[in-house]
Image (tube, rainbow, N blue to C red):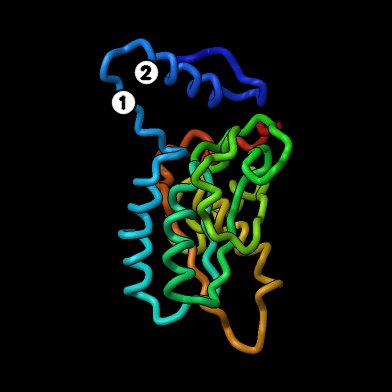
Amino acid sequence: MKVEDRDDTGGFLKTRLQKVKELCAAVPNAFWTNQYGNLDAMEAHYELTAAEICAEFRSLDYVFLAVSTAGTIAGVSRRLKEHYPNVRVIAVDTEGSVIFGGAPRKRHIPGIGSSIVPPLLSLAEIDDVVLISERETVQACRELLTTHGLFVGGSSGTVFAAIKRYAARIAGSRRPTVLFLCADRGTPYLDTVFDPTWPTRLE
């Protein structure tokens, strides 16, 4: 089922969520996993994603995490704060998302940002927030590919752009250990982020 009516933010998320609620009320035994509020999503990242990180790194100074449903940042931040008490968790969002109080605006790159404040966000332990424009995301995705050989998608590029912008603030007497997750591959973005003509169509 496809929704076609835009919500008050100019997107479709609220319309989709309303349709899900209507279907759950109308269809017997319907079940909605609710990625925005399901505690199991947070627990999965606490028990699995963050546990893998803790097993691989003796110390961490900064971790940069994209935010959309907030399941990843909620689970990862809580466990990393337990394991590395001094680690700073930097949340990364895209301009046009309302998660951290920004004004809603049409967004073109999926996988990061949201038209609602996800309930799981209240469980995340965040020290700072960086907002990135979609043009910066495009540049960062292409740099990751051409310079570092990483063919990743929009959320990964957005986080990399945030690290580049934040770098001057974390310079010190020693080189810090900084982590970010590449949560998406570049294949779904061939017609957008990796199309040389596409950024000219961004508003």
Residue 77: % across, % down: 48, 62
Q: Residue at x 67, y 33 (%)?
A: 202
Residue in front for this viewpoint, 25 or 180? 25
Disc 2 residue type (three-letter):
Cys
Q: Report how far apart the C-alphas of labels 2 and 1 lie in the structure.
A: 7 Å
Relative side of 137 to 150, left or right: right
Q: Residue at x 63, y 37 (%)?
A: 199
Does 126 sit above or below residue 95? below
Q: Tag 1, which secondary structure?
A: loop
Does 25 sit above or below residue 187? above
Q: Of callouts 2 and 1, which one flags the residue occurring earlier in the amino acid sequence?
A: 2
Q: Which residue lies under the disc numbered 2? A: 24
Quarter placement of the C terminus? top right
In the picture, the disc for residue 31 is 1
Relative side of 134 to 21, left or right: right
Are there few (<14), some (14-19), or many (20+) residues within 10 Å of tag 2? some
Residue in front for this viewpoint, 115 or 143? 115
Does 49 sit above or below residue 100? below
Residue in front for this viewpoint, 137 or 97? 97
Does 47 sit above or below residue 68? below
Q: Give the tally of numbered discs.
A: 2
Quarter occupied by residue 129: bottom right
Mark 2–mark 1 contact, CB under 8 Å?
yes
Residue 57: % across, % down: 39, 77
Quarter occupied by residue 130: bottom right
Residue 128: % across, % down: 65, 61
Are there few (<14), some (14-19), or many (20+) residues within 10 Å of tag 1? few
Q: Residue furthest bottom?
A: 173
